[in-house]
Image (cartoon, rainbow, N blue to C red):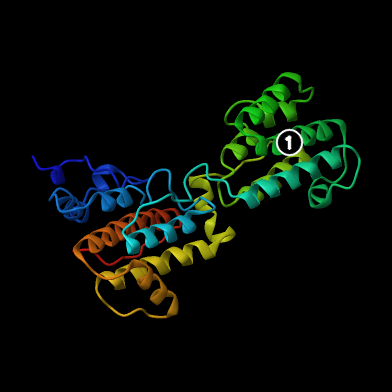
Amino acid sequence: MKISEKRVLEWWELPGIDGREAFDEEILFLNEFAESGKLPRWALLIRDLLPRWGFEPCAHRFFDGLEQVLAMIGSARPGPRLGGCGDIPLFVYQRLQSAGQEFLAWAEGKDGGEVGTWLEKPDPAKVEAARAVGEALLAMGHGWVATDAVLETWADQAKFPLTQALVDGEDGPLPKLLRHACCYNVFVNIRRLAEGIKTGEIPTIQVCRDALVEMPQLAPERLAQLWLLLDALSRWLKRKPAKDGVQAHIHAMLGPHDPVRDWLVASLYKTLKLWQMYLDKLHGKNRRLPSLI
């Protein structure tokens, strides 16, 4: 049996797409070229950096990573790629530290800045919860060992049920937020934590799939950028001129046509098309995208 007829080359795997559902003639077509032996190693290395599990639109730097992939295709040189799960930008660490300081300041009866306006009036349970959140946010910059130590300490010494519920277990709101600080909506999740402390209710932290569900409300520009990329890639593959200056820039990044670049761009288009299909399903839309065949 040929590789192209097996479910082996799972470079296209992504959340929410069943293997049998996605393993269609487009993937067979792309896999057939991959098994032909005509692909240089650099092309296979770049193909392994395309969007799938672990490189997803919910990440802060997903689109930065996509730009890097476009440049790799154009230059025929693989390299490091941003935007994977766990990739937390420096500005996020800065914001986490600032928010942590504000939680602690509020807990000490000082001006808590923006966080203080979310927390409103203190009481002992709220103060303890805010202190736990503040210390954990400040620990993030020191790495996971330091962060876990703070969470474990608070899980052991918390006096109030609210704090215990926030910090305890992998699915506790605070560990969940910190584990997914790479998610584009992390600052919204921090506000959800603060509002949960204010009301005394356990907040729901939205990450991964749930973050994609709320993307039209929180970050519609990310959906627009994905659609723009899909259209630009489709036009490049069909050798159609760019619609505007942005698409012209994308086409310039991809470089000239040749069989290897055509295969790589088609593979990238397929992975983004699968993501668009998944997002449309989450958002109740049904749009047809151009086929590769």
Going by the image, does 111 lie left or right of 194? right
Going by the image, does 243 lie left or right of 240? right
What residue is pinned by disc 1?
133
Comparing 205 with 66, the one in front is: 66
Three-letter amino acid code at disc 1?
Val
Q: Would residue 195 be visible to someone looking at this image?
A: no
Going by the image, does 17 lie left or right of 293? right
Q: Is residue 57 above or below residue 165?
A: below
Q: Is residue 253 above or below residue 15?
A: below
Q: Position of residue 268 (x, y in %)?
A: 32, 58
Q: Toward which corner of the image does residue 77 lie, by quadrant?
A: bottom left
Q: Position of residue 56 (x, y in %)?
A: 44, 49
In the rendered image, the quadrant that contains the N terminus is top left
Please give the name of the residue rendered at 82% of the width and 39% of the height, measured from the top-left corner. 104
Toward the top, the furthest residue is 156
Labels in figure, total: 1
Please give the name of the residue rendered at 61% of the width and 40% of the height, measured from the top-left corner. 177
In the rendered image, the quadrant that contains the C terminus is bottom left
Toward the left, the furthest residue is 1
Comparing 46 with 6, the one in front is: 46
Query: Tag 1's secondary structure?
Result: helix
Q: Would residue 86 be visible to someone looking at this image?
A: yes
Q: Toward which corner of the image does residue 159 lie, by quadrant?
A: top right
Q: Position of residue 147 (x, y in %)?
A: 66, 31
Going by the image, does 233 lie left or right of 225? left
Please give the name of the residue rendered at 27% of the width and 43% of the height, measured from the top-left corner. 10
Please give the name of the residue rendered at 86% of the width and 31% of the height, measured from the top-left corner. 124
Comparing 259 with 269, the one in front is: 259
Comparing 64 with 16, the one in front is: 64
